[in-house]
Amino acid sequence: MKINSEKKPAIKKKKKIASKKKKIDEKFAEDRHLTKKLAEKFAKQKKKEDDGAVLKFKVKDDKQKVSVENSASHNKIILQAEERHVSKQYQLELRNDALCSQFKSKISKKDEFLIDVWLHGDCVLHLPKVFLHGGELTHLEEVINQSWKNKCVVCHEKMNANVPFRSFQEKFQLCIEERTTPTLASQIRVEDMCQDEAQKLGPKEDEKEWKMPFFDRDHHLAYTFADLSKCPTYLDASRPWLCYWSVHSLNLLNQTFSHDMKSKIVTFLKTCESPEGGYGGGPGQIPHLAPTYAAVLALATLRCEEALASINRETLANFLRSVHQTDGSYIMHTGGEVDMRGVYCALAVAKLTKILDQSMIENTPEWIISCQTYEGGFGGEPGTEAHGGYTFCAMGALTILGKAKLAEKDSLLKWLSNRQMRFEGGFCGRSNKLVDACYSFWQGAVFRLIDMELEKEEQPTLGLAFDTRALEEYLLICCQDPRGGFRDKPDRPRDLYHTCYGLSGLAVAQSYDESKQLILGGEAACLPPIDPVLNITAESETFASSYFERLLSC
């Protein structure tokens, strides 16, 4: 910090004033010392004429200067920081009336002083509580005041700095107690693993910069495509799911499919279709709502008429009606259990294939609402614990029915927001449970569904109701397997399920950045937009809806 003024102190001062000044000087002695060190390290900025801007940022390095004033495009600055990591400094200039309270006692109200606070780029961008709202960085002055004593991760001097991630902040770490329960012990173990993963990106002995997370697209493609090419036979009762998880993941990774590959997938899924309607978990198995959903969405993801034409819509509608119950619920298969998944899977395929009718939704909205718990989330059936997967299914089904307004939104939002883990940045599925990559989608997409309902009601949307950057950090730092694919958490093996929903959660987080300039991992990590109701790409949903609409008009 440096206070610039040409004003000279009065020659004569009273002893009382001198004593007061001495105390103030001692209070800011450390700040002065730091200012001196910073001034020696960085060239002094030339004064510029005041242009009336309350807040001004400058990015300066050896090759380029960028000046962004007040509400102008802060995206440029943030983009600069993403490209250069923490190898540059920011200069924050504040008018007297916008200064931190602790500095005001040093400045006369009559004088127009400027304070220069030097900050490392990522220290600004990733400070907790600092957010970008309408082109302005909120709470920045407050955070500068609070975190001045912290050590910078770059130069290790005491300046306004933090770990260059929103996640993995030491202050959010669980305290180790003398007597821990198994639940606490598991949470501590996971936090330690995530911290270890983050520290791998820290500067080495001969380095000053933190590495930013890298999205390993090539390895993800190789892993997912290899599994699909083998036409997996493991998980024998879930083979349509293996197709969907693979095809959707590849679609998110912008992988195109050859005509031969598409035909093989269509042919295989046709062998899983039951003569009674719907799809089984494998060839010759009884129809079940879960693999029916997976098969239909896999076919829609291929974006070809051959795949969509293979669906027998007439028998599919008969199957859906046969598992619909009088109370509005659905059983997963003939003689099977009642489950919120059944409602969502049935309505999702009916909506996509344009076969949804009144007989399939009788009393269904009421049954779904009866599953909302005192916590705010939804359980698998009435009276059960709120769960992330069931909450997505409930809100997805209500959105399809146009009845999302029936959900009690305040308690739902509170429950959802509390499922994001403060230290790890990812979501858990239930209260007092561990973080899991798959809930990046199951929980994250519900925020989008609520936004869709608010837009429908012509109300303001939620905006950033959860920390999207922290979620991206958890997925890219802790969940990417070095060989490709995603995993639940650092000590778990990769699998197609977590690859699919990890990528889907990443797409949800990225959807809040319309400019696509602030995506963690840069352009290489950019994923196509998805339909948050169905969890297929928006392009696939549009293609399938258009195809089935044409069938209705014939």
Image (cartoon, grey):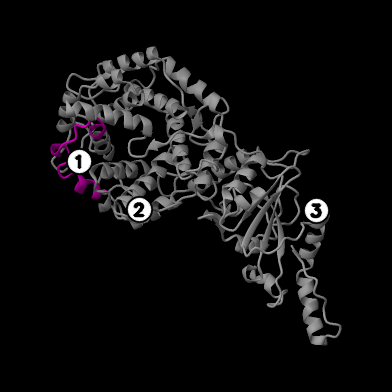
Relative height, residue 39 to residue 470 (above, below): below
Name the side, left or right, on which 21 lies relative to 217.
right
Q: Specify whether residue 178 is in view.
A: no
Q: Residue at 29% x, 17% y: name it.
A: 306
Residue underneath mark 1: 329
Q: Residues within 10 Å of mark 2 (few under 14, many from 20)?
A: many
Total number of numbered labels?
3
The residues bearing labels 1 and 2 have C-alpha atoms spaced at a distance of 21 Å
Residue underneath mark 2: 412
Residue type marked 1: Ser
Q: Specify whether residue 172 is in view.
A: yes
Q: Residues within 10 Å of mark 1 (few under 14, many from 20)?
A: many
Q: Main secondary structure of the magenta part?
A: helix
Front residue of 74/419: it is 74
Query: Secondary structure under badge 1?
Result: loop
Residue underneath mark 3: 43
Measuring from the top left, give residue 293's x and y in whole percent: 29, 29
Relative height, residue 456 to residue 485 (above, below): below
Whichever of labels 3 and 2 marks the residue nearer the N terminus, that label is: 3
Q: Residue at 17% x, 42% y: name it.
A: 328
Q: Residues within 10 Å of mark 3 (few under 14, many from 20)?
A: few
Residue type marked 3: Ala
Q: Tell me the magenta residue range.
A: 349-371
382 in magenta:
no
The residues bearing labels 3 and 1 have C-alpha atoms spaced at a distance of 70 Å
Name the side, left or right, on which 5 lies relative to 253.
right
Residue type marked 2: Leu
Q: Nearer the viewer, mark 3 or mark 2?
A: 3
Q: Nearer the viewer, mark 1 or mark 2?
A: 2
Name the side, left or right, on which 53 lies relative to 245.
right
367 in magenta:
yes
